[in-house]
Image: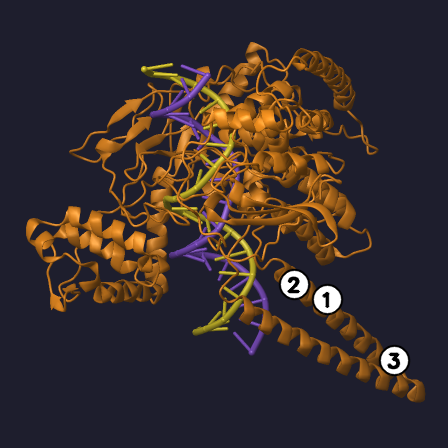
Chain colours: A orange, B purple, C yellow
Amino acid sequence: MSGDYSHNNNQIDCGPRNNDPHKHKEKHKEHKNKDHKKDKEREKSKHAISDHKDPSDKKHKDKEKMKHKEGNADKHKDKHRDKEKRKEVKSADGKVKKEKENGFSSPGHVKSEPEDDFYHSPKQEKTLKREREEDFESEFKPKKIKIENDKAKGKKRKQENEDVKPKKTKNNKKGEVADGKKKGKKEPEEKWKWWEEERYKDGVKWQFLEHKGPVFAPPYEALPDHVKFYYDGKHMKLAPAAEEVSTFFGKMLDHDYTTKEVFRKNFFKDWRKEMNSEEKSKITDLKKCDFNEINDYFKAQSEIRKAMSKEQKLKIKEENERILQEYGFCLMDNHKERIANFRIEPPGLFRGRGDHPKMGMLKRRSRPEDIIINCSKDSKHPKPPPGTKWKEVRHDNKVTWLVSWTENIQGSIKYIMLNPSSRIKGEKDWQKYETARRLKKCVDRIRSQYHEDWKSKEMRIRQRAVALYFIDKLALRAGNEKEEGETADTVGCCSLRVEHINLYPEKDGQEFVVEFDFLGKDSIRYYNKVPVEKRAFKNLQLFMENKATEDDLFDRLNTSILNKHLQELMDGLTAKVFRTYNASITLQQQLKELTSPDENIPAKILSYNRANRAVAILCNHQRAAPKTFEKSMQTLQAKIDAKKDQLSDARRELKSSKADAKVRRDEKSKKTVETRKKAISRIEEQLMRMEVQATDREENKQIALGTSKLNYLDPRISVAWCKKWDIPVEKIYNKTQREKFAWALDMAEDDYEF
DNA sequence: GAAAGAACTTAGTAGTTCTGCA
DNA sequence: TGCAGAACTACTAAGTTCTTTC
């Protein structure tokens, strides 16, 4: 893990989601800022920890200032080093190597993208020059593109405009337009390297945005007459509104949700709202409702779809492709960009995770009148379906979304945004890792600061220090306060309650052990027994004194207090950055530790997956073990056994042919020996692959690697590792991931250091 | 300065497509 | 060629953080 710092003993196989041993008690009430009297007494009586201004505070601040100064000096040195590094390097073959900046390179050439006929706008010229964002951290400096003279600008502009000109897309396969690749064409067309361009400043996200608007869910299609709903054993024909909602439930009959009391109650309440007065008066008990025919009908439909002929399937695929081409892309600042989710969420029953109080509620159908469109004033605005109107068309270029609407369950806003491969998402991602790298430079200072802080006389400072210690050491999430009764009862670091930890002065031969047991994001259980520093332990004892189990552990702390403090320690620092930093640094360290030069490619990939797994465990990224896991492991094991038999047979054969060759001493028998030797090494190779696969699969049973790979691991670490060990990057990142991390693939060299 | 609202990232799951093997 | 299982994608819930409002 991350040096001696992140000791994470997360036990992944600690039971399924929601399997919290202590049933979550009734939600506690506002513990923050509450009952000050009680707190003060507590503090006074014990360790004379004052909640008031600490006279030593000023001293502290001065000290802090000094530290900051030191930090700045370091920064300066680093900058200097970076500058040195950035100088052009000539490689042995005389080629100018890419200029490096924090391990990346950036030749300032003009992009050439495929032309396309999707959008054309006369307004593109002004978008060409983006100004540099001034406050952008030093590490996140794309190389300044050489300043173009007017002539050059004109040339670039021309090329950019050509980017959006018609492109023949006959027989296009999925993604080809986006990729700018044509089948059969060997030379890959160059993609837009947005990371070599200037960024906008002042929060501007784009200058020009044009899109076709969202795709709505298809209208409800009534059930055929033979599919019947029964109430109390009697057939009942429902009016379309109630029937539609009944199908939402009927489709889910095989799902666990429909057995949950809360789900059933919420569904029934909302369903009744959709019934006419006759239906409402008759249907009063969900237990008497029989949705089986509806369930069977949808299952049959699914079978029919599966059994379709190739031609029929192809037709559907083509239609989907057409919709994708029409609605799945937008034009942002001269570049055609893929939209992530261009469909409005269809109506259905809300599937809240864990013990969500709103599960089963009806998610209503969104209409054009609910939809806000965001695009350029001077673009071709998307048209609402005939006879309808948008709620609003706005032109806000300080946000990244294209479409938004408010959902009816929690009243939150939903957005249509761009794909992770887009410039707008990529820049943000890159910036995220640069912030984490800046944390690397000052993390020691921050750590010594919180080690000081937990001796403070002020309770709030001690709490802040211990919480930060956990966020840093265990990669816990910040833990915002949540509205009671609105969501599942989950917590993060700042919102931990007394009931979520147990303290053991000594456990299993270790001192000062803290046992964490709580439900985190998505109601995934976090269970970890971890030895902590004595001061942290003693502080926890103090924080828990005279508190009830449902009280907040850190009653003088919340995420905004913590983040404000972090902001003072480092510009742009928030609790979340620690997770990114610890994940990435762990990957880098693990890769160094686990990769041995003599191993072959599959073994190296196993090492990579193990490093990735270490991060996933640190971040508590779990998944349900695949339903077919045991069976597929058995199958694989059987194959391994068979391969082993095959190997021993082959060895036996080799032995006998060697003996044979000794006697005969002819060419033919010599050849046989060689052939059998080759066969053996082939079988050994196959066996080794299978065994590696089995190990990997077993270790991965309940761990999800994807989340950390996509969100926490600086891709440049992986790219550098691939380059260093000659591993094809395709073995680590699939196509989508390579598109998302195109910037990293382009800029990271084999010596990249996070 | 706190609360509410908005914007955006992170997350697991369900459904679909691809791949390798018998 | 068909099937099983792996790999990938789409979907959308659930977080965090930033911004606005009062």
Instruction: Give x and y (percent) for residue A80.
Output: 77, 17
Left or right placement of residue A269 versus residue A331 in this view: left
Q: Amino acid at mark 2?
A: Gln
Q: Could you tell me which chain the residue with mark 2 belongs to?
A: A
- Residue A41 is situated, as x and y percent measured from the top left of the image, at 54, 26
Q: Residue at the location (32% across, 66% down)? A: A303
Q: Residue A413's x, y, as percent?
A: 34, 32
> Local crowd at mark 2 within 10 Å, few (<14), some, or many (≥20)?
some
- SS for dot 3: helix
Residue underneath mark 1: A688
Specify the subunit that label 1 lies on. A
Residue at coordinates 52% horizontally, 27% vertically from top-left? A39
Neighbourhood count class around disc 3 (C-alpha, 10 Å): few under 14, some 14–19, many 20 upward: some
* Chain containing mark 3: A
Mark seen at residue A693 = 2
**Distance of mark 1 from mark 2, alpha carbons?**
8 Å
Q: Which residue is mark 3?
A: A670
| Label located before the other in sequence (2 or 3) | 3
| Rendered view: A722 above or below A667 | above
| A619 over A603 or under it: above or below | above
What is the x, y in percent for residue A308? 33, 65
Q: Is residue A193 above or below residue A396?
A: below
